[in-house]
Amino acid sequence: MIGVDERGYYGSFGGAFIPEMLHPNVEELKENYEAIMASPEFQAEFRGLLKDYVGRPTPLYFASRLSEKYGAKIYLKREDLCHTGAHKVNNTIGQIILAKKLGKKRIIAETGAGQHGVATATVCALMGMECTVYMGELDIQRQRPNVERMRILGAQVVPATSGSKTLKDATNEAMRAWINNPVDTHYIIGSVVGPHPYPEMVARFQSVISEEIKWQLKEKEGRENPDLVIACVGGGSNAAGAFFHYYNTPEVRLIAAEAGGLGVESGKTAATTAKGTPGILHGSKTILMQTEDGQVVEPHSISAGLDYPGIGPVHAHLFEVGRAEFVAVEDEDAMKSGIELSRLEGIIPAIESAHALYALNMIEFKKDDIIVINLSGRGDKDLETYIKWGNY
Amino acid sequence: MNRIHTLFNTKKERVLSIYFTAGFPNLEDTVPIMEAIEAGGADIIEIGVPYSDPVADGPTIQDSNQIALQNGMSMNKLFEQLVGFRAKVHLPVVLMGYLNPIMQYGMDAFCKKCKEVGVDGLILPDLPMQEYLDEYKALFESYGLVNTFLISPQTSEKRIREIDGNTDGFIYMVSSHSITGAKSGISEEQINYFERVREMNLKNPRLIGFGISNSETFTTASNYSNGAIIGSAFIKVLKNSKNLKEDVQGYIRSVIN
Ligand SMILES: Cc1ncc(COP(=O)(O)O)c(C=O)c1O
């Protein structure tokens, strides 16, 4: 069985390795999140906002020209059509309602591509809460439009200037900010990472993705289970959401596309399962890229949202037990797949999601297989990267 | 007997612990700085093992970690440097480090080395109490290592009592809700917290850390506890020093006098 145990572990991964200063906050969440999430008021508000504000259910779209090209029945789960342009908002809606129920007044968050930052700034505006987003200095440069979106929404964007100046460092800064403001502040983590209960909580908010895939596929194909589900993995929240209701359905193959960067052996990669080893990052035991001496290695990916040296503990576990197949998609290949989808289906995907698309070239499948690709976000935020790359 | 126990058996007031990052400002400064701390008159030496992602630390200690790593500091290097230090340094020595580098070295091998070179205790900020009890307590004890836990103003009375029951060295009181070096001076709210914990009559001595920088803050902290820990302020002394031996001794004297 894939799932979290009461100690917060998925197999040998997970836990809550946090400084004592964060213990009360994390404990408060752990004690309350399940009861709050299970309450009818929470569910009504959460479901209501997902429907009327986010625009759920997102379509499960049969991509006929893509299907023809690859020789399978390919469906795209259109998370790119969520309000704010990516799946990230499913989680921020859930967490902000939770934060309100816990009586919190301020929100902090980290962001890589800026999608989670935008999704957080958005729900803070919606709920009238103060919002501070930590973002690596390098990401601020390469995701300019999202920085300005956050500011327009009223959030303060604080640059993280340490280390690689990307998502890892933004996460460090957000954790520090939480230590400094433990009483009135909730930290909305943007992926299935961090100390227990975050990975499970975020996965449950995102699990609406596979919940919908099941009934939508049933309507279209007369069956709930596709043969394959493919998703990209940065920290792993869109993948966890797309896999969640299939974790324990072994006949559904789960494919996780990591960022290969310039190549797994190039030293410039974010392919965590290929290059990583077990260790502790941002409060959980997981697989991360590190030196022999246990120093975290700075990752590389053309896509800011995948530029992270670890993966969520649930994915480390899926990898460990062989439940999911992991592929490493290189920068160049992801970009090509982004253009391909644009030309074949009229959809410009986020570069993160383009990694999932390219996985079609790396795995074996049969002609009549039904494949669901989780299209985690749209490419608007990546226009500059597409333009700079220029091969179209 | 463990040197930490010996210390607190004889000294119960104005205990001064000094933190520095191994390998900072220069790779080979570790043991000379320890000697200078002892000569200056401090009571405990806390050696920080540098890490790429020190989430409980503020900018001053983060920078020292990064520079130490650039200088080539590593767990192997540190233990190499510490071989034989007991011929020169007699104070209790505590290693402070984040869990990941220690896990990669191997917890068993790490504890064994600590004992071999003469380390007395550990402060591992991201090792939670339950994990310690379940996985490591027996190991630490078998190597005679005292484990120190942190508490903060947010820590509940119940948990403070649990922590007090699960250690026999000292308790590290984080002075405010903050990362290291974040605030200066001591507020009324902090005093209330110091008094609240003092009145709990814990079995372990308490040292107050985070935001202690000079004679005045050291004295205030010592009025409510058994002493204090200085980190960021000391790192700044090292950073600006032209003569480590003199500056370290001078600084420590200025704090305790
Ligand atoms: C569109 C999109 N997809 C995927 C990701 C990666 O995150 P995760 O692996 O948590 O889904 C991001 C992160 O910013 C994103 O913006």
Image (spheres, rainbow, N blue to C red):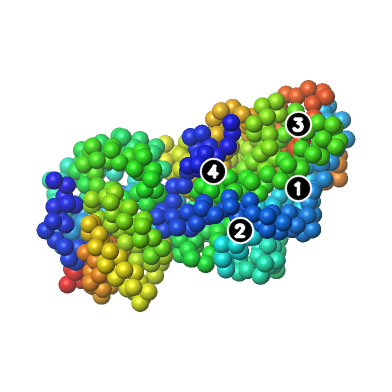
**Residue B194 point in image, percent of width and height:** 30, 69
Residue at mark 3 to residue at mark 4: CA–CA distance: 32 Å
Mark 1 vs mark 3, foreground winner is 3
Residue wearing tag 3: A225
Residue closer to the observer: A370 or B201:
B201
Could you tell whether B237 is left or right of A306 in the image? left
Residue closer to the observer: A83 or B236:
A83
Subunit under mark 3:
A
- Same chain, labels 1 and 3: yes
Mark 4 vs mark 2, foreground winner is 2
Mark 1 vs mark 4, foreground winner is 1
* N-term-proximal mark, 1 vs 4: 1
**Residue B219 point in image, percent of width and height:** 23, 72
Badge 1: residue crowd in 10 Å (few <14, some 14–19, many ≥20): many
Residue at mark 3 to residue at mark 2: CA–CA distance: 31 Å
Residue wearing tag 2: A98
**Does dot 1 land on a helix, a strand or a loop?**
helix
Mark 3 vs mark 4, foreground winner is 3
Under mark 2, the amino acid is Leu
Q: Which mark is residue A309?
A: 4
Subunit under mark 1:
A
Q: Is mark 1 within 8 Å of ligand 1?
A: yes
**Residue A365 point in image, percent of width and height:** 75, 24
Mark 2 vs mark 1, foreground winner is 2
Subunit under mark 2:
A
Could you tell whether A249 is left or right of A198 in the image? right
Q: Is residue B187 above or below residue A107?
A: below
Under mark 4, the amino acid is Pro
